[in-house]
Image: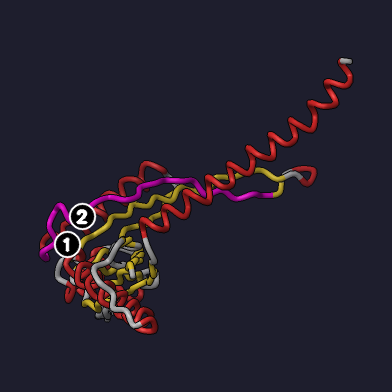
Amino acid sequence: MKKIFYILMIPMLIASLFVFDSLDVFSSKAAANELSKFEGNIVTVNGMGAVKVKPDIAYISLGVETFNVDAKKAQEDIAKQMDKIVDTLKKNGIEDEDIKTTGYNIYKTSKYEPANLGEKKNRIEGYIARNIAEVTIRDIDKVGNVIDLAGKAGANIINNIRFGITNEEEYYNKALKLAMKNASGKAEAVLSTFGVKPEKPYRIIENSYGAPIVYRDNAMMKASMVAENYETPVEAGELEVTARVTVEYKY
């Protein structure tokens, strides 16, 4: 009698699972349909705007690298040279807060030499000291002049000349307005095929922020360049500030 009862229960359980599963699918579809009714028909477009700007600020990494067989002497040499560079820059209009140390290290150099029985031994040749500072130049026309002054004062490393914009938010907001105008034009073109005009946006997503920073190729100042009456030509060019948006319109 119990076996018959179990056999009868199995189809009932399968049927109930099918019913619950169907109800779950039905409820999901119903929820989706309700959401669709609430939001209505929506067209989504992407907009982009760009503004070209001449950079008004520059950043240069410069410094000194020196070698000495004595570690302490290497430190003293690099300190004297770096002090001379900083003093020169300050005397020529660079403010104290626009010069900051970004790197300082001392490491030994070694040479492997043959020893007895074909073995090699490690012989310390000396020590290399390096001091790097980032200099902010607020007059874009003086970038080449700053490089020349630093080189003549003893800098033998010039790295990462970067150009940027002081008030980038002002130009980004202009690009953002152009991006919205671009998106509106796209929406109007799409909806015109249905004889509809886009109204106020239903949803707006800002997809980007910020102006680019242009990097120039790294350069190492050579002793021959410093010795000559050399004027470094540096062209900042233009930066392009871009903004991107995703806009949804109901129709």
The residue singled out by tag 2 in the image is 99
Q: Is residue 200 above or below residue 70?
A: below
Give residue 121's quadrant in the image. Answer: top right
Q: Residue at x 56, y 47 (%)?
A: 26
Give residue 240's quadrant in the image. Answer: bottom left
Asked if residue 100 lies in the magenta stretch, the reply is yes
Q: Quadrant of the C terminus?
A: bottom left
Secondary structure, mark 2, is strand
In percent of width and height, residue 119 lies at 75, 44
The residue singled out by tag 1 in the image is 89
Q: Residue at x 38, y 66 (%)?
A: 42
Asked if residue 245 lies in the magenta stretch, the reply is no
The three-letter code of the residue at mark 1 reads Leu
Q: Which residues are magenta?
A: 92-113
Q: Is residue 117 left or right of residue 190?
A: right
Crowding at label 2, few (<14), some or many (≥20) Cα neighbours within 10 Å?
some
Secondary structure, mark 1, is helix
In percent of width and height, residue 234 lies at 27, 78
In percent of width and height, residue 239 lies at 28, 75
97 and 51: which one is in front?
Answer: 51
Whether residue 161 is visible, yes or no, is no
Q: Quadrant of the N terminus?
A: top right
Tags 2 and 1 touching, CB below 8 Å? yes
Q: Is residue 6 left or right of residue 220?
A: right
Q: What residue occupies the far top of the structure in this picture?
A: 1
Crowding at label 1, few (<14), some or many (≥20) Cα neighbours within 10 Å?
many
Q: Is residue 22 above or below residue 139?
A: above
232 and 249: which one is in front?
Answer: 249
Q: Earlier in the sequence, mark 2 or mark 1?
A: 1
In percent of width and height, residue 140 lies at 18, 73
